[in-house]
Amino acid sequence: MIKPLFALAVLSFSVQVIAQTADSSKANPITFNVGGGIDTYYAYDINQPESGEIPYFVSSNKHNQFGVNLAYLSLEVKSDRFKLKMMPAFGTYMNANYAAEEGLLKALYEANASVKLLKKKELWLEAGVLSSPYSSESAMSKDQLMYTRSLAPEYVPYYLGGARLNFQVNNKLKLALAVVNGWQQLKDVNSSKAIGTQVEWKPSKKQLINWNTYVGDERSTANPAFRTRIFNDLYWVYTGDKFFTTAINGYYGLQLLETGSSSSWYQFNVTSKFTLPNKSFIAARVEYFNDENGVQIQSINGKDPFECFGAALGYTLAIQENAFLRFEVKELMSVSGQHFRSSSGSPTKNTTIFSVNLSAWF
């Protein structure tokens, strides 16, 4: 039995178990899938942060050390009417992004159960630790046009704790409504719940348009003056052919305060990927992020309102379909103020970050 068990731990597989119903002529197929992957990296920030952490990022954020950004195991059980998904994970991304969670919740990338509510309609209810629809980027680097993330996904929920209705209207339109604990919260920090919506539209095989909203009370011990947060996120992904893909993302958030005033933050970014003849690809990104009142980002130099431009260039060598070797350089530039610190500790306007990544998955 040892060899089969070892094989299950390292190979992706799918098996079908036929559960007989009262009528033996009918069967209910149950599919069990196992997958996983490891995202390793080395990053170097020319400002050489004394803390050893690249400021403003939770993804691949360790300076001058080899690290595991994300290692995960994916377990899924599916039938016509239910789905179960469990994704335990660890790595520097998990340590940074789940720091506010408790106990074993810190190790749950995703964990949820889903049931199909109507036999003839694709209406599903899922609950647990849910994936997030916000921004066109996720924590799963293999699915991204570039290895490192822009500032955009680092300041929206990467995950949600709650329940969500998903309705696949047709092959072009999907709608979702979620009730969640709050803005990236598995442990609720107040007695209020938040509402999120998603409209995913595919006008053609080459295009994806996604519009997401969020409304919730964000008061907490850390931010007692916060009240209702209103957030809109819109992105468009265009896959022109086998050689070109581009993603455009913009969002705007408004944080209402106890005083009756409000603060806003917003961003815009464009990322494009060009596939080369050897199936490797190059990608480039430009971005702008403005959070002058520090709702999401407070400058590490304290007083300066955060406003930043960014540009990145990357090269990916596709060793095979499930293994990438990636190289990237990213420049971040303060628009107003000085949001970075030089290697001597003095404020500076810019930083440059070099990254190398090796990822494999099954």
Image (cartoon, rainbow, N blue to C red):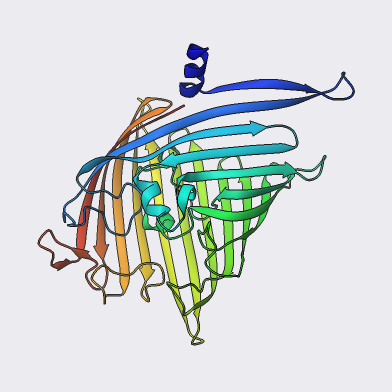
Residue 20 picture quarter: top right
Q: Nearer the viewer, residue 264 or 280?
A: 264
Q: Is residue 249 above or below residue 32?
A: below
Q: Nearer the viewer, residue 96 or 133?
A: 96
Q: Is residue 322 left or right of residue 305?
A: right
Residue 196 picture quarter: bottom right
- Residue 359, percent from left and from top: 36, 33
- Residue 129, percent from left and from top: 56, 49
Q: Nearer the viewer, residue 77 or 267?
A: 77
Q: Is residue 146 left or right of residue 10?
A: left
Q: Is residue 148 above or below residue 321?
A: below
Q: Is residue 328 above or below residue 16?
A: below
The residue lying at 46 percent from left, 80 percent from top is: 225
- Residue 270, percent from left and from top: 41, 53
The residue lying at 9 percent from left, 62 percent from top is: 344
Residue found at the far bottom of this picture: 259
Residue 149 appears in the figure = no
Residue found at the far left of this picture: 344
